[in-house]
Image (cartoon, coloured by chain):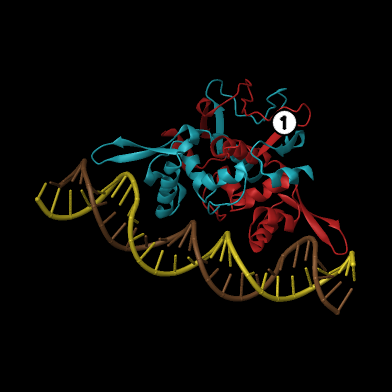
Chain colours: A red, B cyan, C yellow, D brown
DNA sequence: CAGAGAGAGTTGCTTCAAGCAACTAATCTC
DNA sequence: GAGATTAGTTGCTTGAAGCAACTCTCTCTG
């Protein structure tokens, strides 16, 4: 992706993408989830231009998604860690991973597996109804305007 | 986001983002999930440039994520529907939505709610272990090289 | 049957973000 | 004090997105 600024849209997805929808951002977060935390490591691992990486990191820190913490003085060096807000992006990354595994994995199979540290099982896939606890797929769900919907959105939804 | 082409990366996330990581793509899919299916409606609703929208739709159809089906003859007109491959992107969209609701929702509350058609409950959030069925968060999971990992990835993982 | 209008794009130009390479700066090692 | 390490910054080029105007096909209205 490119820019932020899907202006005038009253939508949480658009707002989320303003923050993490720029090119490289999700891949930077993936690397940090996987334990790559320093500028040069990120740069080498991703192959992203250094100026772009610097811009992304600065943005993510500014938004409170990453935290820049020193790992040594003299010379002062920092690494980038995920804040809670950043950790909460984990499901987004995982869903992309699982979709990619299914539809765009190399023929040899998925390059990364996510295993339950406790029992060694692999991560499954399910969304669940908060009331009846049934797993829900696209077909089971209806979108309706929420408390923050604009009048226009609400009326659009009614006519559908 | 911008371009496709996170070359040389052996990673399902990068591969997924090559397909759906361009600017506007996810928002196009969101609109189609929500029932907006025609060129002009998408264009108006998103505020995206028409040439860009045309390029995205063509790409998505080419990748088998969308299908272009006629909804009338004379004049021949098409609408864009999600294929199974496209429907499987639903969890990605949902996770972005939920993250956006939590961290970037308008003060009035989320603009969209997803409700279980069956029971009227709202969509919860949980990832689950396929073996022991426990819900898993970031901390419960370890990434390890999968069958398709490159030698370099496998050795990187071992040194972590 | 002429003119307006809807729907779905296409074309050409401008602007702005990403790619690339080279440079800076602080410190440690030999 | 020469070279390596880490983390950027600067300046220029390339390429994608924004914008407006145009096209084309058909339908509808007077």
In this view, the residue in front, C8 or C26, is: C26
- Front residue (pair C29, A118): C29
Residue occupying the point 70% across, 35% down: A114
Query: Mark 1, residues whose alpha carbon is within 10 Å: few (<14), some, or many (≥20)?
Result: some
Label 1 sits on a secondary structure element that is loop
For image coordinates 50% across by 46% down, the residue present is B25
Residue A54 location (% of width, % of height): 68, 60
Q: Which residue is mark 1?
A: B136
Residue A155 in view in this figure: no
Rendering coords of residue A121 (x, y %): 72, 27
Number of numbered discs overlaid on the protein picture: 1
Chain letter for mark 1: B
From the viewer's perspective, is residue A73 above or below residue C25? Answer: above
Residue B17 position in % (x across, y down): 56, 46
State the residue in front, A119 or C20.
C20
Q: Quadrant of residue B61?
A: top left
Q: Looking at the image, is B82 positioned above or below residue B25? A: above
Relative to A75, residue A36 above or below: above
D30 or A82, which lies in front? A82
Q: Where residue A46 appears, x then y in whole percent?
A: 65, 53
Viewer can see residue A136:
yes
**Is the C terminus of chain B in the top left, top right, bottom left or bottom right quadrant?**
top right
């Amino acid at each position: 992706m490119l820019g932020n600024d899907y202006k005038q849209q009253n939508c949480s997805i658009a707002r989320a993408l303003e923050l993490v929808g720029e090119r490289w951002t999700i891949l930077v977060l993936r690397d940090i989830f996987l334990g790559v935390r320093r500028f040069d490591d990120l740069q080498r691992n991703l192959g992203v231009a250094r100026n772009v990486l610097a811009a992304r990191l600065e943005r993510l820190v500014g938004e409170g998604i990453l935290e820049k913490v020193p790992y040594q003085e003299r010379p002062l060096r920092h690494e980038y860690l995920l804040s809670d807000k950043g950790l909460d992006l984990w499901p987004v990354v995982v869903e992309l991973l699982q979709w990619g595994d299914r539809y765009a994995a190399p023929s040899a199979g998925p390059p990364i597996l996510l295993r339950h540290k406790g029992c060694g099982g692999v991560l499954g896939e399910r969304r669940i109804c908060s009331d009846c606890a049934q797993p829900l797929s696209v077909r089971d769900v209806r979108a309706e305007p929420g408390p923050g919907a604009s009048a226009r959105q609400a009326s659009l939804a009614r006519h559908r």
